Amino acid sequence: MKLALTMALASGLAIALAGPAGAQETAEKKISMKNVPAAVQQAITRESAGAKLKGLATEVEDGKRLYEAELEVNGHAKDVSFDEKGNVVSVEEEIALDKIPAPARAAIEKAAGTGKVLMVETITEGGTSAYEAQLNKAGKKSEIKVDAAGQTVK
């Protein structure tokens, strides 16, 4: 009886941690171009023109398979995610802090306080852009994501 109860609790915990059906995510897995659908290969070739392709990965996010091309463009990182049909889903591109809108920069600098801004990226998804910064405050790393007006974004 005790074993059955333990198994039932463990099973319930696993289901609760996995989240609702279809919302499960898998860890990012490195892949090669031959493991990418033809439509995605064409999109990667198009999006990586003038850039160096550093690597490819795939993962399942919200029940959908995504493919990510890790690029280097003019000395900075740029990651482009595609759906299975080759459509661009998101773009994350490293950018200098002084190149983002002043309200976003001010919000990031305020969040960093006496700490340090390690990196800033422009995140473009679904036609909207935000700025994500990695911070180091008192030896602890954290992130903040804000819109162009400096408002925090989830």
Image (spheres, rainbow, N blue to C red):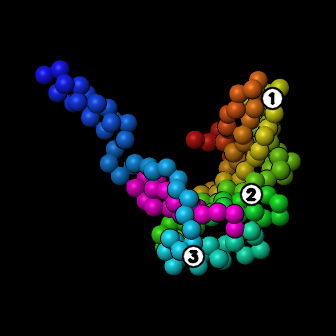
Q: Nearer the viewer, residue 32 or 132?
A: 32
Q: How many C-alpha atoms fall within 10 Å of the one at disc 2: few (<14), some, or many (≥20)?
A: some
Relative to 11, residue 97 above or below: below
Q: What residue sits right under mark 2 in the picture?
A: 77
Amino acid at pointer 3: Gln
Q: Earlier in the sequence, mark 3 or mark 1?
A: 3
Determine whether, in the image, residue 93 is placed left or right of residue 11: right
Determine whether, in the image, residue 21 is placed left or right of residue 87: left
Cβ atoms under marks 1 and 2 closer than 8 Å: no
Disc 3 is placed on an element classified as helix
Is the stretch drawn in magenta largely helix, strand or loop? Answer: strand
Residue 132 sits in which quadrant?
Answer: top right
Q: What residue sits right under mark 1 in the picture?
A: 115
Q: Earlier in the sequence, mark 1 or mark 2?
A: 2
Which circle marks residue 13 in the picture? Answer: none
Q: Is residue 30 visible?
A: yes
Q: Earlier in the sequence, mark 2 or mark 3?
A: 3
Span of residues in magenta: 53-68
Relative to 52, residue 60 above or below: above
Residue with the most extreme right position: 98
**Residue drawn at 51 percent across, 79 percent down:** 38
